Amino acid sequence: MNYRLTWRGLRDTRIAQIAPLTEETVPPKLYGGIDRVVSFLTEELVSMGHEVRVFARGNSVTRAKLAAGWPRALRFEPSIRDTIAPHMVMIERVARRADEFDVVHCARLQKHWISMLLLPCLR
């Protein structure tokens, strides 16, 4: 038998996937373990019928809806000296839209500033 697991039995769960802006595209072309996990998870969630929005680099490729946090990976931007600032802007965008999502998944929640900014906005 072919079972399709869905969160709470819903096929249209609204999910926000947040990927780091520093390394690679989603999916990565070179290095990027976290980005690969975000890509695999996102593509499977879309296949399962969920509505997924990926907050990542603008040159990422996905079947989900893409919300560009920055045009390309920050490590390829020689003018960027502070990589935290673009992340903060992207996280703020997610926080402002938190009521649009049933689930918010951040691949790097160990960054305390992400959880401090985002968690108070969630129900």
Image: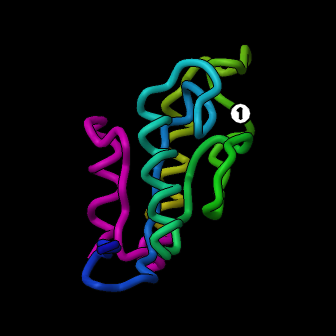
Q: Secondary structure at mark 1?
A: loop
Q: Is residue 102 magenta?
A: yes
Q: Residue at x 56, y 52 (%)?
A: 55
Residue at coordinates 50% horizontally, 25% vertically from top-left?
32
> Quadrant of the rendered structure where residue 118 is?
bottom left
Image quarter (top left, top right, bottom left or bottom right) of the N terminus: bottom left
Where in the figure is residue 95, as x and y percent of width and height?
Answer: 44, 63
Q: Amino acid at mark 1?
A: Arg
Q: Is residue 29 placed above or below 48 in the rendered structure?
A: above
Q: Nearer the viewer, residue 22 or 80?
A: 22
Q: Which residues are magenta?
A: 97-123
In x, y percent, where is residue 38?
A: 45, 45
> In the rendering, at what x and y percent does residue 89 appear?
55, 48
- Residue highlighted by disc 1: 72
Figure coloring: rainbow
Q: Is residue 98 left or right of residue 82?
A: left
